[in-house]
């Protein structure tokens, strides 16, 4: 027989599983954004090193100007990527908290179900003890009511 507590437990388990999926997705997205940021940083570093080498060997002003503008646009892209990574880390943190909340709720329902099951077992044991006591008392009464004490 399905109880309302069983339904609540199942709903809580589904919510916890969905929160876990959101957390896993947020973590995957965080890794992707971090990888993109790392690639951008590496690319910017290589480009800056090339500019530095070209400046040693001589570079015309137009190329210097274009390269500096490109480096500035890379710096803007890096700033945007860092903000995106920070936002994604916040999403991971929020998803982690949500998963923990759903896990605690499920644990509370599981604890309640366990307590109810234990109480049911205690009640059943009491009933069995009463039935056993009643049976023994009934036999004793029949035995004392019989002639000859049997």
Image (cartoon, rainbow, N blue to C red):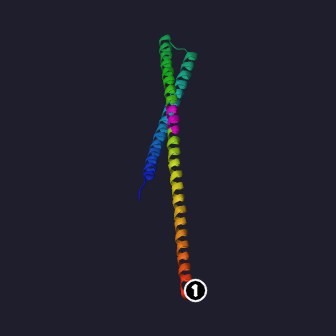
Q: Quadrant of the N terminus?
A: bottom left
Residue in the picture at 51% in, 16% down = 68
Residue 41: x and y, percent?
A: 53, 27
For the point 51% across and 41% down, which residue is it?
101
Task: Give the number of marks.
Answer: 1
Q: Residue furthest left?
A: 1
Residue lying at 53% horizontally and 77% vertically, measured from the top left? 138
For the record, the magenta segment spans: 88-97
Q: Please say whether residue 90 is one of the residues in the magenta stretch.
A: yes
What is the chief secondary structure element of the magenta stretch? helix
- Residues 64 and 13: in front is 13
Q: Is residue 57 magenta?
A: no
Residue at image x 50%, y 17%?
A: 72
Task: Reply above or below: 144 against 60.
Answer: below
Q: Nearer the viewer, residue 11 or 134?
A: 134
How far across and how far down the image is residue 54, in percent? 54, 18
Viewer-closest of 108 and 47:
108
Which residue in the structure is indicated by mark 1?
149
- As helix, strand or loop, the secondary structure at mark 1 comes to helix
Q: Position of residue 73 (x, y in %)?
A: 47, 19
Q: Quadrant of the C terminus?
A: bottom right
- Describe residue 76's horizontal placement relative to residue 149 as left or right: left
In the displayed structure, 116 sits above or below 62; it is below
Residue 103 position in % (x across, y down): 51, 45
Q: Residue furthest top?
A: 61
């Amino acid at each position: 027989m399905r109880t309302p507590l069983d339904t609540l437990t199942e709903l809580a388990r589904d919510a916890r599983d969905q929160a876990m999926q959101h957390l896993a997705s947020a973590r995957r997205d965080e890794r992707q954004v971090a990888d993109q940021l790392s690639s951008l940083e590496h690319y910017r570093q290589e480009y800056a090193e090339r500019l530095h080498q070209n400046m040693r060997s001589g570079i015309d002003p137009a190329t210097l100007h274009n390269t500096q503008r490109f480096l500035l646009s890379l710096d803007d892209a890096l700033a945007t990527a860092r903000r995106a990574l920070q936002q994604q880390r916040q999403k991971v943190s929020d998803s982690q908290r949500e998963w923990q909340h759903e896990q605690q709720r499920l644990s509370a329902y599981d604890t309640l179900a366990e307590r109810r099951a234990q109480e049911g077992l205690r009640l059943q044991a009491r009933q069995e003890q009463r039935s056993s006591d009643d049976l023994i008392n009934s036999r004793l009464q029949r035995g004392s009511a019989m002639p000859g004490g049997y």
